[in-house]
Image (cartoon, helix red, strand yellow):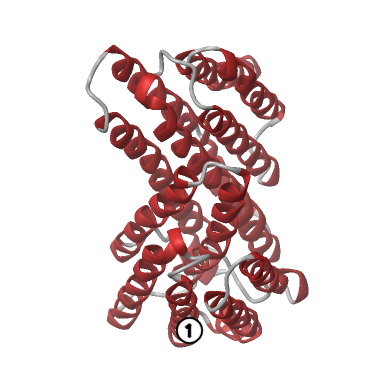
Amino acid sequence: MAQRLARATERVSSVELLFDLVFVFTITQVTEIVVAHPTGAGVAQAALTMAVVWWMYDAFAWLTNQSGEGAGLRIGLVGAMVAFLLLAVAIPDAFDATGILFGFAYLAIVLIHFGLFAAFGAPGSARSMLRVIPFNAGGAVLLIVAGFVTGPADWILFALAIAVLVSTSFTSGPVGFDIGASHFVERHGLLMIIAFGESIVSVGVGAGGHPFDLAILVGTVLCVGVVAALWWCYFTGDDERAGRSMTGAPTQQRAYLALTAFALDHYVMIFGLVLFAAGVKLTIGDVFAVAPAAGVILLGAGVALYLVGDARYRQELALGPAALRYAGAALAAASILLGLVAPAAWQLLALLVIVAGVIALEWRRDSRKSP
């Protein structure tokens, strides 16, 4: 019990904040896949790439949750940062010219992660990693093989790699992990802030590539407003309630929630922000004109996907009703129809009103329930 209470009060360390800076570049690179190839194939490639990267990136959140802090761990995390940076460099052409670099960088990340868990992880979780490492290494090997081939084989090998990586969750499960709730919630909240930040950067980069005029001003205000509303959805008290929910859950249930509510649902939310950021880059040049269909679809689908992931996250942790967020997701998807016939500014305004409306209605409902 003493160990559990101590771990529950841990906070994110400064070395983890340094480590998370690599994630900024990672999201930027995944976004560039969609911007360069705003098609179904481009989105699918970005989704597969993001999935394999997120699996190991989130694995380091498990590592730092189950380990102390010392010089050895810091040095290991810096080494992992280098490998993740090389991996991120290879992301845009991972299905082509830089596939070999991507695969070997991924293997290096897997081996560093296992070594750090073996050296610094809590005894129970370190033993559990012996069951996990064959799956992680097997997925890395498949990605290396993918680097030597092109065409449909890449798609098959990436899909197989994801299947191998996540299969450990359905075979042995997260046994032996006593997740520190406060640390885990805060760490994923910081990762979400990074994803929101990438959306803001996309607004700035997209606007900076065009002469400043009224269209750029209006587009910037609307895009930042949508991102701020999505941020509000996540940090409107759900983060605090998530900490309490995780702390009060039994040990084994906390470990499963770490897989579902945090690994899976956060992936959905982050990829939704990736799609929205790509849509911003494709539409912000002239929001007073009807935007290209690809940009319109990405804006609506990105917000819809984010709200679906957020709603599921609320359900997993029993943070509150999720019906309004699912309804908001459906309306966000419907905004695509508006964007196809009206200037992009109207779709962005509609998305802002939809997300803000969800927040306002939930606040009103919660206020009525309060004594």
- Examine the rendered structure and indicate whether residue 114 appears above or below residue 369: below
Q: Quadrant of residue 253?
A: bottom right
Residue at 59% across, 21% down: 358
Residue at 22% across, 23% down: 211
Residue 263: x %, y % from top left: 59, 57
Q: Is residue 154 at least partly visible in the picture?
A: yes
Q: Quadrant of the N terminus?
A: bottom right
The secondary structure type at the circle numbered 1 is: helix
Residue type at tag 1: Leu
Residue 215: x %, y % from top left: 33, 15
- Examine the rendered structure and indicate whether residue 71 appears above or below residue 315: below
Is 1 left, or right, of 76 in this rendering?
A: right
Q: Which residue is situated farthest in the front direction here? A: 151
Residue at 32% across, 73% down: 82
Please give the residue where the numbered disc 1 appears in the rendered image.
Answer: 111
Q: Quadrant of the C terminus?
A: top right
Residue 195: x %, y % from top left: 43, 45
Residue 162: x %, y % from top left: 65, 67
Q: Which residue is situated farthest in the right direction here? A: 171
- Examine the rendered structure and indicate whether residue 200 appears above or below residue 89: above
Viewer-closest of 90 and 138:
90
Viewer-closest of 62 and 68:
62
